[in-house]
Image (cartoon, grey):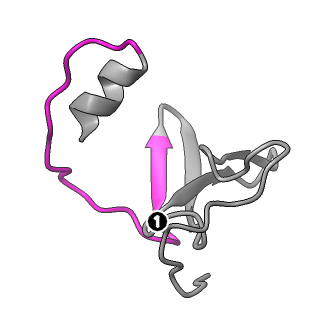
Amino acid sequence: MPTQQAERFGLGPTRSFEPDRWLKGGDTVRVGALALEVRHCSGHTPGHVVFFHGPSRFALVGEVLFQGSSVRTDCPVAPATR
């Protein structure tokens, strides 16, 4: 599936990989000196997360919001966690 999606967007060949760590709400991810809080974002796809930097109130949300559209309704909804 990732290879097909990459081709659809004009990207080069990809290969599957197994992550060495699964993120969950409450985890912290470091990027250089920056610490980002992992927040679970149920309702889009199972396991979707948002990366939040509290001091600057900045969030990396991926494709959680669709401009001018509604949310996807074809994905199962996970119970909200905090």
Q: Residue at x 62, y 45 (%)?
A: 63
For residue 24, side relative to residue 34 (left or right):
left
Vertical position of residue 79 compared to residue 7: above or below: below
**Quadrant placement of the C terminus:** bottom right
Say what amino acid the circle numbered 1 marks: Asp
Q: Residue at x 85, y 44 (%)?
A: 68
Dominant secondary-structure state across the stretch colored magenta: loop
Q: Element under label 1?
A: loop
The reply to whether the magenta stretch includes residue 23 is yes
Residue at which label 1 appears:
27
Vertical position of residue 3 compared to residue 10: above or below: below
- Give residue 37's position: percent from left, percent from top: 58, 58
Is disc 1 surrounded by few (<14), some (14 to 19) or many (20+) residues within 10 Å? few
- Give residue 77's position: percent from left, percent from top: 53, 79
- Give residue 4's position: percent from left, percent from top: 26, 30
Vertical position of residue 65 compared to residue 9: above or below: below
Foreground pick, 5 / 50:
5
The mark total stands at 1
Which contiguous range is marked in magenta?
10-30
Residue located farthest toward the front when viewing the structure as drawn: 74
- Give residue 30's position: percent from left, percent from top: 46, 44
Displayed quadrant of residue 6: top left
For residue 65, side relative to residue 43 (left or right):
right
For residue 24, side relative to residue 80 (left or right):
left
